[in-house]
């Protein structure tokens, strides 16, 4: 049985780090905060690996099927009988796999930051925020209650906000962190309403019961939920769609992706952890968590998920080919790869032999975490060396950064899907699943994989080859062991993770699935990948004007891609022009001038009337006598003529 | 537990303040008095939960009767349920924080503290009264000091604001009085809430009296469109005044709307519920959009208060047990949060001498403690889990969603949309003040929070966290009380 103490400690240790460093770090632990944070996370990682081992090899599989366990459940807030937010730990293949990914990548980032962030004034704050993020992400992964996942969802959002805005005196960082928070908040509104709909239909917030009730055909919950509809779409479909919108926001799916490239304003290790390996895949995780509902009850929504993923994958890949800031290239590449994971889920089905997409998606999530974290950390080493994010300031760095060069190359080969690196296996599995279920998405994915190889090697050649590097100022080395060790460990992961028989462990219903693997099928994607690499080699290996000429010949298309298809501008128009000028300003004006104006008018009228009346009370006896006389006459007249 | 302690403690403190000889004495006596009141509030909480745990299921605990005017059937009748306990606790938290942040008031210190404590006295009395006449008496006790606090210690166009606030609240009081008298004469000459709740008040009478009472109390809690005293009142009030105004006074209104109007006149409540929902949904969204355009920190919090208390009224209008529980949680949560927000604004203003967000920037560098508190309160306002605002708003949403017709669904979704707008204005405020480059080199000389400010902030943050991290205790306190109310109204 799962050891609930050990599992609970996995998120609690980073939380302890956050509290300790947040409260006492600035004053007392200025220099040791990095070590403390890293040590706590190392303990977490060990516990996570222990949990994974125990689950996958000792108790998890009963009669050949991986079971779901909820070893701990605490009622946090009860709304009514049976409907409550429970803080629980859920243990099943995907949560255990995510535990390993999150703790491992986070540990790598903690170690790396010991070197990268050395000498920062707010070093303890940085580590405390990392602890907060890791805690929140682990809590998200372990959520056994849909509201619990929302709670941690918001918490990872705020940790991401804090870390993007880490350099708080940089206006661009402030703008970026606000943008990231608000865009994802907008998506979370959908998530929240989705939760309300699904939980109202299911009469519970706990995942296992909710999924069971919403997927058993003929259950009372389904019947009532299907009869309610709005605009011709059933309540359940609305709920599932809105929940997915939450996931799409977090996972930077088109058109909610605009925050991700800007989020690169954060320190590079943060980008590696949050905006490449862990938080941005939360949307994929959410869809996987609710997969039976999507697949069995609302297949139409699942199809939309597939298309959103595919469109995001190709758009991001096209944009990535034109960007010049290396972190932005990587950001778009992340978006594109998450698109792969998303459409893999979209083309999958629950049971009936079509589950391979689900497994492939999570497999890709796993391998992507390795090679993308590696790419970001490698980019960090490069940025650390040249003090710039721009590709034009780089070139010829292979001589100065040998370890970074080799590990970066491994990561590039992995993401390009070249065998035998990790990305090859997972991408192959995804393409196979798409090929079986949705040909159109398969073709999009195939083109995207060629583009992926091209933009990654464009990056690689411009950084490490191209023109010879000119050293400005003092020359310093590659960074200490703290920065190199994570690169090497992640490179091992990026090279070898593909050999894990993933289908054995992860599938929608816990039953192992056979990994289908055809050598013949792999020819096309690998050939496209190699083609992309050759194109990049031809254009960027040596300094030349070939690439500029190519860009010029593409004209409008290049310009549109370079400007990210003007999606940011559209958003700016909507928020600045429409929301601020057409809603906010009128509301504020209306309040001051109309609503308050009426209040003041009431006050002024009263005052004016009393001004008029007060003259009557003059204190002059003669005047009173006249009023008195007038009154008597009036009464007399009334009495005499009105009596009848 | 003797409830008269709750009135006795502030009364004694107020008298002691009047008798004290110098500024130092005034401050320390006030602080000691507010510590005692905090202790009394905690004793009440534990006594109450102890009684409940022991199986006492009476609706009101610790009841007391003292005849005041036998001929008119006006009595001192005190008693508490979970709602009263929560509100008393809130008042004691805000009071002690208010006393602490006013530590450096130079002008007429004695009178200032006297009025503060008088305000708290009024609030305590209000929350434990079960006789409408006495309840009204305490409500008025808490109005007059506000007028003076703003008029004397205020800033800006303080006379205008003080007049506006006092007149609007008096107008509300007048409506309450008329409604009260209406109840008195239709229901057998009684002001007693418990007795009135047993009476069958004719439906057509309820239709007339309910709006009087609801709107009357609604003015206190910024019912749209009678909220306009809020921005002006807050912007002119001294820091502690704003804290009390938003933290406690607005809750008097919400409490009255529920305990008096809705509880005693359920048919009226059902009849007008849709109007209440529409008005509060408007307040929530419109308040949030109006906040987005404000540049003065106090206006930002004032308008955001209009938006946030809208959730209380929305919860009441939804008439489900969960929504009402959420409404009550929102009152407690908003009380703590807004008091803290005004306290922080006061701290910043004392140092920078401006409240305009565009004149600040980069304050995190010079005052890390104050800006950290600003972050916490901002995140609470935008409903971050782990802080109290989230718990309250989610409970309102969950409760509202149980009304499954289109009207209620649309109202709930409209209210939920505010979570995005709130994020926009909060991040804008924080981003422009705490973050960004330091705009004014002179700010480098500024000092971070002093002990009294730190203590005040820590107390309020502790309250926010106590609800945000472990909401169970507050839920257990409020839910049974909400259930009693719902039993009377009927429905889910």
Image: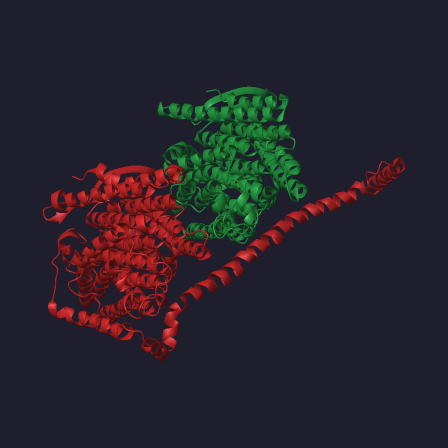
Residue A462, image x, y percentages: 30, 68
Give the image quarter of residue A148: top left
Residue A95, image x, y percentages: 23, 48
Q: Is residue A300 found left or right of A162 in the rendered image?
A: left
Q: Is residue B184 found left or right of A468 in the rendered image?
A: right
Which chain is drawn using green? Answer: B
Q: Is residue A527 visible?
A: yes
Which chain is drawn using red? Answer: A
- Compared to residue B375, the image places residue B115 above or below, namely above
Residue B68, image x, y percentages: 59, 21
- Residue extending farthest bottom: A553
Q: Nearer the viewer, residue A543 or A516?
A: A543
- Compared to residue A323, the image places residue A219 above or below, namely above
Q: Quadrant of the N terminus of chain A?
A: top left
- Compared to residue B305, the image places residue A267 above or below, namely below
Residue B78, image x, y percentages: 51, 24
Give the image quarter of residue A27: top left
Q: Nearer the viewer, residue B24 or A503?
A: B24
Give the image quarter of residue A206: top left
> At x 15% / y 59%, what residue is drawn?
A352
Q: Quadrant of the C terminus of chain A?
A: top right
Q: Is residue B399 found left or right of A531 in the rendered image?
A: right
Q: Is residue B201 visible?
A: no
- Compared to residue A198, the image places residue A638 above or below, namely above
Q: How many marks?
A: 0
């Amino acid at each position: 049985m799962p050891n609930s103490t050990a599992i609970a400690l996995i998120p609690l240790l980073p939380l302890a780090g956050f509290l300790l460093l947040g409260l006492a770090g600035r004053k007392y632990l200025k220099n040791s905060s990095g070590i403390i944070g890293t040590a706590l996370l190392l303990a977490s990682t060990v516990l996570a690996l222990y949990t994974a081992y125990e689950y996958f090899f000792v108790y998890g599989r009963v009669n050949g099927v991986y079971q779901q366990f909820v070893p701990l459940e605490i009622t946090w807030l009860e709304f009514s009988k049976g409907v409550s937010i429970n803080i629980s730990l859920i243990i099943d293949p995907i949560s255990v796999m995510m535990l390993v990914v999150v703790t491992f990548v986070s540990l790598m980032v903690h170690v790396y930051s010991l070197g990268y962030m050395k000498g920062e004034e707010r070093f303890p704050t940085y580590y405390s925020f990392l602890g907060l993020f890791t805690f929140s992400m682990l809590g998200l992964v372990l959520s056994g209650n849909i509201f619990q996942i929302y709670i941690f969802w918001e918490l990872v959002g705020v940790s991401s906000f804090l870390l993007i805005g880490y350099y708080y005196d940089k206006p661009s960082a402030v703008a970026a962190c606000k943008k990231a928070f608000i865009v994802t908040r907008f998506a979370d509104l959908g998530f929240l309403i989705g939760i309300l709909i699904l939980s109202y239909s299911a009469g519970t917030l706990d995942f296992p019961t909710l999924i069971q009730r919403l997927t058993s055909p003929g259950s009372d919950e389904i019947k009532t939920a299907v009869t309610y509809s709005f605009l011709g779409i059933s309540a359940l479909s609305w709920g599932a769609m809105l929940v997915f919108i939450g996931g799409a926001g977090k996972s930077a799916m088109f058109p909610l992706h605009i925050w991700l490239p800007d989020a690169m304003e954060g320190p590079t290790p943060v980008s590696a952890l949050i905006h490449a390996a862990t938080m941005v895949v939360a949307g994929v995780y959410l869809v996987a968590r609710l997969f039976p509902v999507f697949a069995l009850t609302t297949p139409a929504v699942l199809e939309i998920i597939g298309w959103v993923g595919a469109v995001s994958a190709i758009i991001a890949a096209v944009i990535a080919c034109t960007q010049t800031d290396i972190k932005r290239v990587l950001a778009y590449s992340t978006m594109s790869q998450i698109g792969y994971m998303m459409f893999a889920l979209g083309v999958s089905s629950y049971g009936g032999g079509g589950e391979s997409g689900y497994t492939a998606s999570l497999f890709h999530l796993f391998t992507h975490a390795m090679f993308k974290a590696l790419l970001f950390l490698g980019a960090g080493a490069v940025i650390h060396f040249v003090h710039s994010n721009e590709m034009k300031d780089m070139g010829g760095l292979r001589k100065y950064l040998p370890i970074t060069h080799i590990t970066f190359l491994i990561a590039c080969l992995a993401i390009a899907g070249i065998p035998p690196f990790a990305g090859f296996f997972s991408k192959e599995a995804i393409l196979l699943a798409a090929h079986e279920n949705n040909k159109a998405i398969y073709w999009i994915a195939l083109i995207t994989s060629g583009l992926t190889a091209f933009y990654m090697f464009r990056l690689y050649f411009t950084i490490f080859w191209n023109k010879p590097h000119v050293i400005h100022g003092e020359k310093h080395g590659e960074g200490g062991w703290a920065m190199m060790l994570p690169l090497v460990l992640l490179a091992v992961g990026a090279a070898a993770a593909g050999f894990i028989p993933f289908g054995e462990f992860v599938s929608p219903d816990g039953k192992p699935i056979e990994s289908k693997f055809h050598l013949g099928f792999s020819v096309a994607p690998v050939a496209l990948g190699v083609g992309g690499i050759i194109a990049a080699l031809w254009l960027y290996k040596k300094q030349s004007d070939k690439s500029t000429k190519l860009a010029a010949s593409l004209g409008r298309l290049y310009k549109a891609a370079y400007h990210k298809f003007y999606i940011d501008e559209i958003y700016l128009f909507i928020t600045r022009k429409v929301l601020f000028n057409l809603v906010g300003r009128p509301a504020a004006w209306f309040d001051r001038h109309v609503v308050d104006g009426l209040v003041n008018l009431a006050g002024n009228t009263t005052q004016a009337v009393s001004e008029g009346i007060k003259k009557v009370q003059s204190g002059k006896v003669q005047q009173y006598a006249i009023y008195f006389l007038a009154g008597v006459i009036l009464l007399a007249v009334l009495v005499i003529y009105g009596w009848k | 537990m003797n409830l008269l302690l709750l009135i006795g403690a502030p009364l004694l403190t107020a008298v002691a303040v009047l008798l004290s000889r110098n500024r130092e004495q005034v401050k320390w006596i006030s602080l000691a008095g507010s510590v005692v009141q905090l202790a009394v509030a905690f004793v009440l909480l534990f006594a109450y939960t102890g009684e409940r745990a022991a199986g006492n299921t009476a609706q009101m605990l610790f009841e007391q009767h003292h005849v005041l005017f036998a001929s008119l059937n006006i009595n001192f009748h005190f008693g508490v349920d979970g709602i009263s306990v929560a509100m008393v606790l809130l008042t004691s938290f805000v009071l002690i924080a208010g006393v602490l942040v006013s530590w450096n008031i130079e002008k007429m210190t004695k009178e200032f503290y006297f009025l503060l404590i008088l305000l708290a006295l009024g609030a305590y009395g209000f929350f434990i009264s079960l006789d409408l006449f006495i309840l009204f008496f305490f409500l008025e006790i808490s109005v007059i000091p506000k007028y003076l606090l703003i008029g004397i210690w205020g800033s800006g166009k303080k006379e205008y604001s003080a007049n506006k606030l006092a007149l609007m609240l008096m107008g509300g009081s007048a409506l309450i009085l008329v409604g009260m008298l209406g109840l008195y004469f239709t229901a057998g000459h009684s002001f007693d809430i418990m007795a009135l709740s047993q009476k069958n008040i004719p439906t057509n009478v309820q239709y007339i009296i309910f709006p009087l009472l609801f709107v009357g109390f609604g003015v206190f809690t910024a019912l749209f469109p009678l909220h306009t005293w809020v921005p002006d009142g807050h912007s002119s009030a001294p820091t502690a005044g704003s804290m009390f105004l938003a933290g406690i006074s607005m809750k008097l209104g919400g409490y009255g709307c529920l305990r008096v109007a809705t509880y005693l006149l359920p048919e009226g409540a059902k009849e007008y519920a849709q109007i209440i929902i529409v008005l509060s949904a408007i307040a929530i969204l419109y308040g949030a959009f109006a906040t987005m355009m404000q540049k003065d920190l106090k206006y930002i919090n004032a308008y955001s208060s209009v938006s946030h208390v809208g959730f209380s009224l929305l919860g009441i209008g939804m008439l489900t047990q969960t929504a009402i529980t959420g409404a009550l949680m929102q009152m407690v949560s908003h009380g703590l949060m807004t008091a803290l927000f005004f306290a922080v604004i006061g701290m910043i203003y004392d140092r920078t001498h401006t409240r305009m967000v565009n004149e600040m920037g980069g304050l995190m560098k010079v005052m890390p403690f104050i800006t950290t508190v600003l972050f916490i309160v901002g995140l609470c306002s935008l409903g971050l889990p782990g802080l109290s605002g989230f718990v309250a708003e989610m409970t309102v949403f969950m409760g509202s969603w149980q009304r499954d017709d289109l009207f209620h669904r649309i109202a709930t979704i409209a209210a939920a949309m505010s979570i995005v707008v709130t994020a926009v204005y909060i991040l804008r405020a924080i981003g422009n003040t705490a973050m960004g480059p330091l705009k004014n080199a002179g700010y480098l000389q500024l000092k971070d929070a002093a002990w009294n400010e730190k203590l005040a902030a820590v107390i309020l943050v502790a309250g926010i966290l106590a609800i945000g991290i472990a909401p169970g205790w507050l839920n257990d306190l409020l839910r049974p009380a909400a259930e009693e109310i719902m039993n009377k109204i009927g429905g889910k």
